[in-house]
Amino acid sequence: MKQDYIILLFVFIGSLNIKAQGFNSLAQEGLKGDVKYIKTICYNASEYNGSICKNGIITYDYEIGLYPISKDEYNTEGNLIKLTVYDENERRKEESEYKYRDNVNIEWWRSIDAVPRGGKEGDLLTARGWYIEFDAGKPISQTFYFKDGYDSMVEAYGDLRNQKFEGVKVKSYDRYVYGELEERVEKSWNYNLLIKYVSKDKDGNISYMQTNVWSDSGQILCTYVETEGDVIFDSFEYNKDGFLVKYSSRINTEVNEEHTFKYLSYDYKGNWTKRIIYIQDKAYIEERTITYYKIK
């Protein structure tokens, strides 16, 4: 089975023809036009008289990977700069913010609901993030942070040393904890698309390796992960319009998760506005409203 996965990866990689400038978020998500905002609402679905109907907005549950209500914001370069998630009562629950250079993500911050941590209703608390520091336009370091208590942000993951960059992209670094080498990380890129991520322990043994394969249009086709004796293989299938129709995940030889998608309606740009998602034995309906930049 492992050998079959590797052969499949080489077949995909051999067909790649990545654009020189890489791909923005819109291309990677299969979106058409100059998208500015997307508001998505996800409903439980049930069958009635042979049809799939909406049956109330889903409740907020981080584990299932679907959001009751979400709002995406894109900049004029077509990159996602903010994702805000709301519960079924439109209360903010989490938010992620992104910054880019040359279509490469160079900064990310995630905020979460402050109420369980003593904050006020609707407030968000910055929980973690990272950024790349520049000097005279060149990247010099990447730093990770996480929330320690309610007020303070502290540096996470130990001390990153020997950091190397490829353009603005992180190529490799060594991670030290309490002065001792803990991990060595290496990354390979095809323009702004991450092709391989390798983590080695202090003795040089690979503890985690991930290979990503992308389509000519910049959409993820599959990921292959080796970690702690397991092989995890995720695959993504798209229709002719570039919309995801099937996602499956295997751990070793067992199917761990499978989603299928059926598209019901589209807007004047050709982006979908309504779809059904089937996850195992449950169905959900997603509806979204898309706002575009007015290009003069």
Image (cartoon, rainbow, N blue to C red):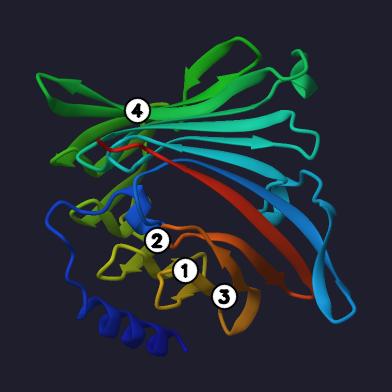
Q: Quick one: label 3, few (<14), some, or many (20+) residues within 10 Å?
A: some
Residue contact at pointers 4 and 1, CB within 8 angstroms: no
Q: Quick one: label 1, few (<14), some, or many (20+) residues within 10 Å?
A: some
Q: Is residue 155 left or right of residue 278?
A: left
The foreground one among 42 and 183 is 42
Q: Which residue is mark 1?
A: 243
Give the answer, above or below, for where 56 lies relative to 131. below
Give the answer, above or below, for where 117 lies relative to 266. above
Instruction: Say which amino acid is labelled 2.
Output: Gly
Residue contact at pointers 2 and 1, CB within 8 angstroms: yes
Mark on residue 131? 4
Cα distance, mark 2 to mark 3? 19 Å
Cα distance, mark 1 to mark 3? 15 Å
Which is more N-terminal, label 3 or label 1? 1
Which is more N-terminal, label 3 or label 2? 2
Instruction: Say which amino acid is labelled 1.
Output: Phe
Cα distance, mark 4 to mark 1? 31 Å
Q: Is residue 3 left or right of residue 186?
A: right
- Please provide percent x and percent y for residue 53: 81, 66
